[in-house]
Image (cartoon, rainbow, N blue to C red):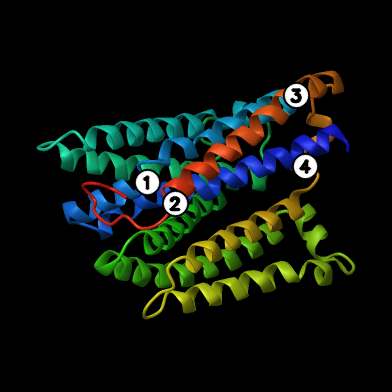
Amino acid sequence: MDLALFYYLLLGFAVLMYVVLDGFDLGLGILYPWFRSEGERDHMMRSISHVWDGNETWLVFGGVVLFAAFPAAYAGILSTMYTPIIIMLIGLIFRGVAFEYRFKSHRSKPWWDKSFFLGSTVATFCQGAILGAVVQGVEAGQQGALDWLTPFSVFTGFALMVAYALLACCYLVMKSRGPIMARSAHLGRKLVLTIMAILVIVSLWTLYANTEVRARWLDGINFLLLLPLPLLSALLGWLLYRDLDGEPHETRPFWLAVGLFILGFAGLVVGLFPYLIPHQLTLWQASAPDSSLKFLLPGILIFLPLICAYTLWGYRIFSGKVEDFEEGY
């Protein structure tokens, strides 16, 4: 296989793993205002206490792959996105500190709750805005500090907040019982309708604003070949809405929500391939020399299976519901 294409697929895998795994615990912070009692928030925190920091491994792994395998894209994106990336990192720092201190505090616990909510919200919005700015097209090194902040990137920032909140609702349905489970399912049904509308708006907006994406989807018979992606997304959205009704299914909603993320990500990759920076750099133009890609390969082949293995092991060990928020599983 072409090594540049291999690392492109590997980068996509790392980004998808991060979005799915860190998405639901960032979403829990976004949902905080809808769960006001201390016991409910303790339960939510306990449900992710074993995985929240490990989930961020994929963010680091994706950054390393981008830096080592596609240095031109790394330099181009970061030189334009320093502001939202720094704000995102500050949000993640506040969130991590709040997570650790909240378990050990009493009088200051409300302040750490606010910090956890704000850190999660700010970090998620910045991630969505970065994605929107990249999809829209960035002029690497030629933009001001706030030129990434466009109507489209602002919309995608809020869209990702809704998507993470939906994933968190489905996670809580899987991890809780009683009132928390019922409230999560109720919120999740509203968010399903919202996210399906957002997917339609973002798709049409992208087709209108990006001529290359429009050509990829609409030229010739491409539309017929790619039609299964939006049809499957609509089907998963309907199934998810149905499964969150009444007595919600415990585990299926989470996997349906993950399926929506995968289909949305697949649609994005189909539209942008082979570009890493739309209109500027393809994956082959941005890739490092073959000698560097070969040098990285042994480390990738050793550490990627290890990361996957301990991730699966951690989720397997802590599977099931949180029965007591003071004791955990």
Residue under pointer 3: 298
Q: Which mark is residue 275?
A: 4
Identify which amino acid the numbered label 2 is placed on.
Phe
Q: CB under 8 Å between callouts 3 and 1?
A: no
| Three-letter code, disc 4 | Tyr
Q: CA distance from mark 2 to mark 4?
A: 28 Å
Determine whether, in the image, residue 135 is placed left or right of residue 99.
Answer: right
* Residue bearing the label numbered 2: 24
Q: Please name whichever residue, 119 or 13, is drawn nearer the observer in this view of the structure.
A: 13
Q: Quadrant of the N terminus?
A: top right
Q: Nearer the viewer, mark 3 or mark 4?
A: 3
Labels 1, 2: front one: 1
Q: Quadrant of residue 104?
A: top left
At horizontal 44% and vertical 73% (from top left) the residue drawn is 249
For the residues labelled 1 and 2, say whether their Cβ atoms are less than 8 Å apart. yes
Q: Amino acid at mark 1?
A: Ile
Q: Position of residue 97 (x, y in %)?
A: 31, 31
Residue at left 43%, top 35%? 53
For the residues labelled 2 and 3, the Cα–Cα distance comes to 32 Å
| Cα gap from disc 3 to disc 4, whole angstroms | 26 Å
Where residue 189 appears, as percent x and y from the top left, is 42, 72
Callout 2: 10 Å neighbours few (<14), some, many (20+)?
many
**Of pointers 4 and 1, the one earlier in the residue sequence:** 1
Q: Nearer the viewer, residue 33 or 325?
A: 325
Q: Where residue 115 appears, x then y in whole percent? A: 27, 39
